[in-house]
Image (cartoon, grey):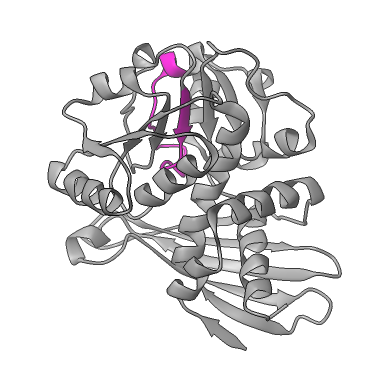
Amino acid sequence: MRIVSAAEVDRALPVLDLVDRLDEAFRDGAEVPLRHHHTVQVPGAAPGTLLLMPAWRAGGAMGVKCVSVFPGNAARGLASVLGVYLLMDATTGMPRALLDGVMLTLRRTAAASALAARRLAHPQASDLLVVGAGALAPHLARAHAAVRPIRRVQVWNRNPERAAAMAGMLRAEGFDVTVAAGLEAAVRAADIVSCATMSHEPVVRGAWLKPGAHLDLVGGYTPAMREADDEAVRRSTVFVDTRGGALKEAGDIVQPLQSGVLAESAVAGDLFDLAHGRIAGRTSPGEITFFKSVGTAIEDLAAAELVAARLGLA
C-alpha cells in the first residue's frame, strides 16, 4: 500500500482538473452513507469533532476519511484539522493507498466551492473577499480565481496579522491582494464573498451584499455554527452541496429552517442538481446567490481517485 504525502496530493490535483472531476462525480453518483459525527470532550478546552466519511462506487473504488477537527489546536501550535484517507478497491476491499487527509480535504473543499461558483457566481465576477485566514483560505482564493476572472482579492480576519500573512502568500503567487480595513466595506465591494471561519455567530450581514453577489459559506460544519445572518438567506437564492448533509448539519441552513426564515422547499438545489443540469444556477445578473457546503464523502473519493490515477495507483 502506497503512503501519499500532502505534497504529493497537492501536486496531483490541479484546480481545474479537480473541479471537473467533482462535476463528473456528482453526475455519476456513488454510495455515500451519512457520515459519522462524534463530539470528543477535551478537558479544559473546547471539544473536538471526529468525522468518519465513507463512500464507494460498485466495481470501482472505495474509501473512508478519518478526520478530526479540534479548534483548540491553534493554541497548541497544531493544525485544527487533521486526518487520513484510506483508498481501497471496491471489488476486493484491498487497500491501495493511504493519503494525507488534510491536504485532500483542503483541495476538494475549495474545488467544491469553485464548482458551485462556476454556475452561481456572475460570469464577470472580478472582486473576491476571503473571510478567514486559516489553512483553507488561500485554497479558496486560488479555486475561485480558476473559474472566474478574479482581478482583486481582499482578505479579512479578526487577527490582522494572520490576514497580512495570507495576503503576502497570495501576493507572492501573483495575486493583487490587500488586507481589508473593515469587513462591511469589503463585503459591499465584493462580487464573491468566501467565508472559512469557525464562527458560531454570523460574520457576514445580508444587508451588505450587493446585487449580483455570490456568497460562499464553507467554515461551519455543525448546527450551532453560523457565518451569515437571516437577511443573507432572505435576499438570496439558496444552494447547498448536498441536501442530506447541509439540511441536517449546517447551522447556516438548519437555524433558518428552524426559525421559519427558510423553507426546505426554498432551497433551490444542490451540487447533484447543478451537475445534472436539473436547475439552471444563476438566472439573472442582479441575483444574489448563496452556497453552503459541509462537505461530502463523494468529493473525497473523487479527489482520491484522481490522485491515484495521477500517481499510477489506479
- Quick check: can you spot residue 308? yes
Write the residue at 57% across / 45% down. Answer: 112
Q: Quarter of the image containing the C terminus?
A: bottom right
Q: Is residue 215 magenta?
A: yes
Left or right relative to 62: residue 204? left
Q: Is residue 241 above or below residue 39?
A: above
**Does the magenta stretch mainly form a helix, a strand or a loop?**
loop
Q: Is residue 152 above or below residue 310?
A: above
Closer to the camera in the image, 252 or 177: 177
Quadrant of res 229: top left
- Quick check: can you spot residue 156? no
Residue 299 x, y percent position in the rendering:
63, 54
Q: Is residue 172 magenta?
A: no
Residue 96 x, y percent position in the rendering:
67, 82
Closer to the camera in the image, 170 or 234: 170
Closer to the camera in the image, 63 or 9: 9
Quadrant of res 176: top left
What is the residue that sits farthest to the left in this orientation?
A: 161
Write the residue at 26% across / 48% down. Answer: 171
Left or right relative to 216: residue 240? right
Q: Is residue 49 above or below residue 265?
A: below
Left or right relative to 284: residue 213? left
Closer to the camera in the image, 28 or 93: 28
Write the residue at 26% across / 67% down. Answer: 78
Write the residue at 60% across / 35% down. Answer: 118
In the image, the segment drawn in magenta is 214-232
Q: Quarter of the image containing the N terminus?
A: bottom right
Left or right relative to 270: residue 14? left
Residue 45 x, y percent position in the rendering:
23, 57
